[in-house]
Amino acid sequence: MIALIFRDLRIAIRVGGGFGLSLAFFFIIVIFFPFAIGPNLELLSKVAPGTLWIGALLACLLSLERIFALDFEDGTLDLLATSPLPLEGVVMAKALVHWLTTGLPLVFISPFLGILLGLQNISVLFLVMSLLLGTPALSIIGTFGAALTAGMKRGGLLLSLLVLPLYIPTLIFGAEAARRGIEGFEIQSSILLLLGVTLLSWAILPFAAASVLRINLR
Amino acid sequence: MHWLLAERFNMPDLGNYAFHVLSSYGVTTLVIIIVIIFSYIKYTRAKKSLEKIEANLNGK
Amino acid sequence: MSFWEYANPVKFLKLSGTVLPYFSVFAALMIISGLCWGFFFTPDDYKQGATVKILYVHVPAAFVAINAWFMMLIASIIWLVRRHHVSALAAKAAAPIGVAMTIIGLVTGALWGQPMWGTWWEWDPKLTSFLILFLFYIGYIALWSAVEDPDSAADLTSILCIVGSVFAVLSRYATVFWNQGLHQDASLSVDKEEHVADVFYYPLLVVMAGFVLLFIALVLLNTRSEIMTRRASALVARRKV
């Protein structure tokens, strides 16, 4: 499993595309919000957590299709399915790599984007924390969606249609945690609920994704 | 007999809300009728094509 | 003689063919009589005025919309466990009806909310979760139509339905957390204190029963056409071979 993680990481870094692309996409989306809303910093800082969360969501979505597509095409996935490593483990490795290559970089650049949107020192922290706890859920849910549409010729649009509704709880709790933190309310409950969603997703979705993959590989 | 019915089924006074009440009943009826018609069309089509194929098979 | 016997498509076709007319007639009778009762013979509510009459279509539609998903969930699990094709097809057949009922629920809700809350739409937990339910239905139907092999499609959609149910419930609680709403509590409950007054309650029950019967009748009809389509394509495939 660890070998698989390193292999996928190497591919992701060497091919390059994935790493930078979704990060750049995130950057652009967040920067476009002020153009749409207007340069009013006060207003922008109010919508900042939501903006960054929507940006993270879309950036995640963009890179989902690649999780299984290449391995499905060249038959690697068939090999992985017959290897001693259970398919659930493969799914978790894939989701982890997806998080390391898209989720984590997003978390790292989010403070700078938060400042661009007028967030002040401490409130940036809440945003980073909510993204750090929430993006793993985005990755594993997305991996489930990618497993559902693996092997479909035009899965892209369908993938977003399937995955976005599943993102709703994460989005609500994550953005809520950031918003409450920034506005100075208590955040413990929303942080815990966000963490709960993330852990629940990681607990049940590898099984669902693996069984879906087995169906698609039949 | 019908005068009795007519007296009973007089239009209730809906006041300001006539539009809301009547249009919600209208929308409901419309959507349900659309669903019924679509299901029915699908059913007759499926039945017809199945019968045609079965007739072909038996004919041979 | 057990319930599972009707998992046999031929037997299912026979049985559903016999009971379908009864269900349809009773559904029509109950909906029409219940709505007439509610529309012509109940007083206005002291608070809501005449808009209370919207309740007679709004509540049953919402009820069926939620329980259609529940029925799909059960049918999906039965398909995954016992591999009865009828079950998978029944789940597929229920989805469009669920969508229709969700639309009715949303539209009548908006029509009721405008005079009562002063706005067509409010990001209230109940309304929001209905919108979310709508999205889940759409994803489910889209997946059915995207997969070509019928058995794989049934498997994939069943798993999506189960996972979707978990996340739909999560979303439901997320929306409550996110915005404490202004929607009424449940209109129906065993607790007498809670539910609406008896005058409104009895006609409402009749319409609800009618809607449930209508749902069953439509699911039976759609399942029948799905089975026939499936059989037709199987026959064609066999002849080609």
Image: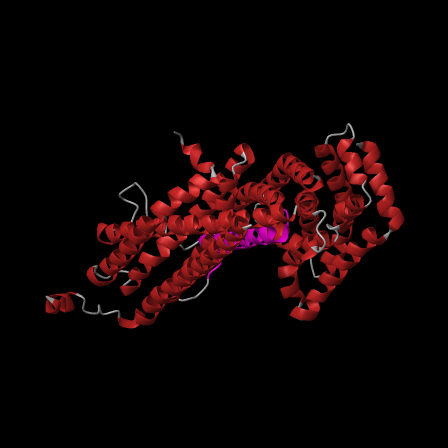
Q: Nearer the viewer, residue C213 or A159?
A: C213
C123 part of magenta stretch: yes
Label total for image: 0
C19 part of magenta stretch: no
Q: Position of residue C132 (x, y in %)?
A: 52, 53
Q: Nearer the viewer, residue A166 or A127?
A: A166
In the figure, C233 relative to B12: above or below? Answer: above
The chosen color scheme is secondary structure
Q: Where does the magenta region start and end?
A: C122-149
Q: Position of residue A170 (x, y in %)?
A: 61, 47
In the figure, A59 relative to B2: above or below? Answer: above
Q: Position of residue B60 (x, y in %)?
A: 56, 50
Left or right, A101 with respect to C176, comes to right
Q: Position of residue A182 (x, y in %)?
A: 63, 53
Residue at point 72% right, 66% down?
A32
Q: Nearer the viewer, residue A45 or B52?
A: B52
Tell me which corner region of the image, top left, top right, bottom left or bottom right, holds residue A218.
top right
Q: Locate the C terminus of chain C and report the quarter of the image it occupies.
A: top right
Left or right, A130 with respect to B7, comes to right
Is residue C124 visible in the rendered image? The answer is no
Is residue C100 visible in the rendered image? The answer is yes
